[in-house]
Image: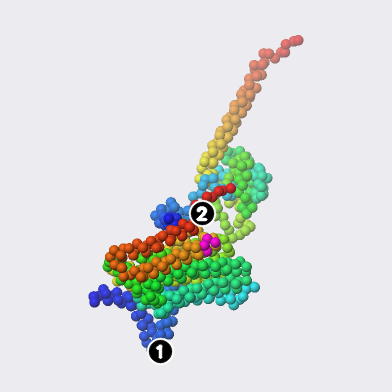
């Protein structure tokens, strides 16, 4: 009958109206400043620098100022100046560190290329989106100190990715240690051999006369 | 008389008593003038407040239907939102286009609002609450209502903008198309009541069938058909969705309102809501028994409360319709008026004539009277509806 479709439509809207009062699941919006949105794990916006130790962020930056990210960055929003001296990194190895590491977030396009090219897993994507400021220039230029965030923070925002990175770093470190151990062992063996060789070779010293 | 009845009586007479308290000390020749000014002030204040909270209710309900909470930042539940909107509209820059006719551009919203407010004069808000007791109240109401169309065209013409002008012409086409079913749909009421006075029409709907069923016009076959046509035409007359083509926010650039900003725009908005309130109040008066209680034992509640309840129900119905139906196209709109509503309204006149002539029938004939009247309403509806929707059947959408 003519008009039943209209009544059906009215029924649908009435159901939504009543439903929105007793079923919070229906809500398509959240009341933002009070209720924070639950971001998906893969959400990313701007990069940050990973530090090993939250207590000493500047001393334990993973970044070794190799400047690959600076060169690869398509909008060229990264500016790095190498240090003149070397400092021990987390594993105690002497490394160059970034004396200046700036990211201009007004230029950054969140492409994640810096993260993908970094061979040291030192730069990762952050999830902080409340970065509005009243200053267009200085407040949007993030310094080394603002960019440095501990590894534990990285693990809290991207758990799966961070676990994988940590596993790889641990494996690398272990491999490096084993290599070092093997090298040390080989060196020791070589030294031993070198020490033993004169003694063993002594009887054969006179060359056969030909 | 027991105490409860006295209390009811005092509540019922409260508005009149309050008025006499204010104007009682005045000399007799001045009293009617101050009484009239008081009535105007009360109508403006109460409907102004109703308008403010109707916009909030509309936004809240639309939000809920779309599964979001609606405005809730200003005050508790967003209760201060209308005032925030008002301040915003007042402080906005008022732009008048250089080529516009300044006087007409200014007069259009004023005229629209003035005609909308004039319609409130004859609405009987309660048993003895009517600003002006006119013998031709219904005629006056629709004359004042029809004058708003003039203001709409005035706005489009004065803006000196081709889009405004085209939209105003479309608006005029729509308003005149729907003026006809609107007028035809209430003629049956006048035929039955035999009066053009709004109070008289309400009084004719008093009394109870079988002791508890109210004798409202909407509860008769012709009354129901008339009410449905009236409400449909009222939706179109007040430019409400799904007939909001004159404005059509999402398609046109606000139609005849394109060149209006700030407080003038707010005036247009206010006039639209006033028109909607007035038409709903008229529908209550003509078909829903006006200020009468729906059941005998509920008569202790004052009459103006019943009028307000019925009017608010219809207004909420308007909002419900708005959040449900998509907008019509202009050809669908006019076809719906001329080919569907006007013939049905004309046939309804015949149904009413039959109802009026057979009012003496009793017993088995009474049942026959009802059946014939229902058939006279349902059969044309089905036939015209089928004819009109033939070939338009369910649409199949093919996506590229």
Q: Position of residue A61 (x, y in %)?
A: 59, 44
**Figure quadrant of residue B350:** bottom left
Tell me how far mark 2 sits from mark 1, CA to CA.
68 Å
Viewer-nearest residue: B384 or B171:
B384
2 vs 1, front mark: 2
Question: The N terminus of chain B is located in which quarter?
Answer: bottom left
Chain letter of the residue carrying label 2: B
Q: Position of residue A7 (x, y in %)?
A: 42, 57
Residue A24 marker: none
Mark 2 and mark 1 lie on one chain; the one further toward the N terminus is: 1
Residue B391 marker: 2
Which residue is rendered at x = 43% and y = 75% of the image? B138
Chain letter of the residue carrying label 1: B
**Figure quadrant of residue A118:** top right
Which residue is rendered at x = 35% and y = 70% of the image? B357
> With respect to residue A108, does A203 lie above or below?
above
Q: Position of residue B144 (x, y in %)?
A: 48, 75
> Magenta segment, which residues?
B331-335
Q: Would you name the residue on which mark 1 appears?
A: B29
Is A122 contained in the magenta span? no
Which residue is rendered at x = 71% and y = 13% of the image? A206
**Figure quadrant of residue B205:** bottom left
Left or right: B271 as drawn, with respect to A202? left
Q: Position of residue B369 (x, y in %)?
A: 34, 65
């Amino acid at each position: 009958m003519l008009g039943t479709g209209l009544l059906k439509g009215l029924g649908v809207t009435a159901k939504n109206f009543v439903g929105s009062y007793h079923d919070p699941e229906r809500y398509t919006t959240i009341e933002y400043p009070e209720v924070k949105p639950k971001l998906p794990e893969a959400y990313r916006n701007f990069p940050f620098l990973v530090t090993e130790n939250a207590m000493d962020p500047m001393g334990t930056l993973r970044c070794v100022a190799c400047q690959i990210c600076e060169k690869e960055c398509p909008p060229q929003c990264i500016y790095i100046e190498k240090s003149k001296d070397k400092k021990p990194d987390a594993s105690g190895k002497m490394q160059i560190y970034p004396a200046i590491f700036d990211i201009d977030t007004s230029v950054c396009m969140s492409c994640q290329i810096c993260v993908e090219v970094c061979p040291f897993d030192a730069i990762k994507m952050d999830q902080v989106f409340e970065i509005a400021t009243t200053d267009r220039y200085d407040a949007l230029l993030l310094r080394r100190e603002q960019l440095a965030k501990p590894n534990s923070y990285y693990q809290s925002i991207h758990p799966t990715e961070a676990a994988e990175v940590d596993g790889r770093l641990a494996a690398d470190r272990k491999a490096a240690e084993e290599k070092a151990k093997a090298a040390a062992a080989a060196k020791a063996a070589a030294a031993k051999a070198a020490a033993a060789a004169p003694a063993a070779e002594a009887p054969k010293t006179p060359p056969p006369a030909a | 008389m027991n105490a409860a009845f006295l209390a009811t009586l005092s509540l019922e007479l409260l508005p009149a008593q309050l008025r006499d308290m204010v104007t009682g000390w005045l000399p007799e020749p001045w009293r009617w003038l101050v009484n009239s000014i008081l009535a105007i002030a009360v109508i403006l204040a109460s409907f102004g407040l109703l308008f403010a909270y109707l916009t909030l209710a509309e936004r809240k309900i639309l939000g809920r239907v779309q599964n979001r909470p609606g405005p809730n930042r200003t005050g508790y539940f967003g209760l201060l939102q209308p005032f925030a909107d008002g301040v915003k509209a007042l402080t906005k820059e008022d732009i008048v286009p250089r080529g516009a006719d300044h006087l007409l551009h200014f007069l259009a919203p004023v005229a629209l609002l003035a005609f909308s407010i004039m319609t409130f004069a004859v609405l009987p808000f309660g048993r003895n609450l009517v600003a002006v007791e006119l013998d031709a109240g219904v005629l006056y109401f629709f004359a004042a209502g029809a004058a708003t169309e003039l203001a709409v065209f005035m706005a489009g013409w004065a803006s000196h903008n081709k889009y405004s002008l085209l939209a105003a012409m479309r608006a005029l086409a729509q308003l005149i198309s729907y003026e006809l079913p609107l007028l035809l749909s209430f003629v049956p009421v006048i035929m039955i009541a035999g009066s053009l006075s709004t109070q008289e029409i309400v009084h004719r709907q008093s009394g109870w069938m079988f002791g508890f069923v109210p004798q409202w016009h909407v509860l008769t076959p012709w009354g129901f058909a008339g009410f449905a046509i009236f409400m449909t035409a009222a939706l179109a007359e007040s430019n409400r969705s799904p007939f909001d083509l004159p404005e059509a926010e999402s398609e046109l650039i606000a139609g005849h309102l394109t060149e209006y900003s700030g407080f003038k725009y707010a005036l247009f908005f206010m006039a639209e809501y006033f028109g909607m309130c007035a038409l709903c109040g008229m529908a209550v008066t003509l078909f829903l028994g006006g200020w009468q209680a729906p059941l005998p034992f509920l008569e202790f509640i004052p009459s103006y409360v019943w009028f307000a309840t019925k009017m608010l129900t219809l207004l909420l119905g308007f909002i419900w319709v708005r959040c449900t139906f998509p907008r019509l196209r202009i050809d669908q709109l006019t076809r719906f008026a001329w080919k569907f509503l006007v013939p049905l309204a004309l046939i309804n006149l015949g149904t009413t004539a039959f109802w009026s002539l057979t009012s003496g029938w009793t017993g088995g004939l009474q049942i026959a009277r009802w059946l014939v009247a229902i058939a006279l309403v349902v059969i044309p509806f089905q036939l015209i509806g089928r004819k009109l929707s033939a070939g338009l059947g369910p649409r199949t959408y093919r996506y590229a």
